[in-house]
Image: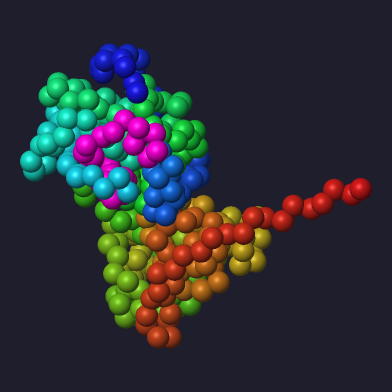
Amino acid sequence: MTTDEPTDSGPAERPWKGLDTRLMPVFISYDQVERMVAALLPAAAKFQPDEVVAIARGGLVPASMAAGILALPLSFLTHDRASGTVSWIGPPASGHRVLLVDDCCSSGTTLRRAQAKLRAEGRECMTLVVVHDPDVARHLPDLSHPMRDLFRLPWERGEATPTGREAKASGARLDPGAEAPFVGVGLDYVLLTKIVAGCHEPASIGLPRFEPERTVLISGIQEAERARIAASLASTPYRDLPLQCRQNATADDKESIARFKADAATRWGCTHFLERDAEQAIGISGHAPHLIVTWWSAASGRGWTIGAAAQPEATPRADR
């Protein structure tokens, strides 16, 4: 267990890797989180905690998993990033030996302050997080999985949205609205034709509702057609939406277009993607599992939320 006393002194925090839009995130799904938490719990059990304490919001899911597996009560702390204040949500923990749980550890500031509060209350504390970045963490958890890649957890999709990144970069108090869904809409000729024909409301063509100010059009149509697309949209409510077209050099097969859309949506910071072509929707979901992908049918006016896992790319065998 970490024995050094928590302190806010030390070198300045390094920027969160998610601010670099060139980096593609590694998505850690709910079932992976549960397995990762379970792998850490034998060591936690040796500490013999009598209560689990979650740091809200991120620590709620892994702490619930840990409390369920260990059959222990669960209490909750919250950390105000701006003031640095840590306080209880509801009744304080009744236990003396507590397992403090958060989802991830970037700088370690939140974990350090929460641990300091628990120690100041006379409690013994072991810290557990699902994953930490050893490149930037100044305060390491007692139990965790190290990962230097940019990681993304299901309940933290919103931190990568344009407004979410802006809030992270500024260090300002995080308004939950900054992490509201940011939607990528796959624009093809079928959808473009419907929009131009006057089907302006998303529901009229089977699309789920989205907020225009938090939407980007991502098209498999080549960049050379941008002017034509913009002219077609000029008289529609979609005229002011950002538009990203496929680079002319990109291959025009469905697999390549799906990868382009997945990468473009990730760089924009999309949390959701709406796609008309079923094969491409599957491909986008496989390439970018952190996106919530909806395949919508222009014929039936319905949408289906889908998930997929991409198979590894084939590696040619070396001649022998």
Does 109 sit above or below residue 320?
above
x and y, in percent, of residue 262 in the image: 50, 56
x and y, in percent, of residue 311 in the image: 62, 59
Looking at the rendering, which quadrant does residue 291 occupy?
bottom left
Q: Decide which of 302, 48 is in the foreground and name it.
A: 48
Extreme bottom residue here?
300
Extreme right residue here?
320
x and y, in percent, of residue 315 in the image: 74, 52
Is 29 displayed left or right of 247 in the figure? left
Does 61 sit above or below residue 227?
above
Is 63 displayed left or right of 82 in the figure? right
Q: Which residues are magenta?
A: 41-68
Q: Residue at x 18, y 22 (%)?
A: 119
Q: Residue at x 58, y 59 (%)?
A: 310
Q: In which quadrant is the N terminus drawn?
A: top left
Q: Residue at x 37, y 52 (%)?
A: 154
Does 168 sit above or below residue 32?
above
Does 21 sit above or below residue 157?
above
Asked whether 217 falls inside the magenta stretch, the response is no
Is residue 281 in view?
yes
Number of dots carrying numbers: 0
Is 2 displayed left or right of 25 in the figure? left
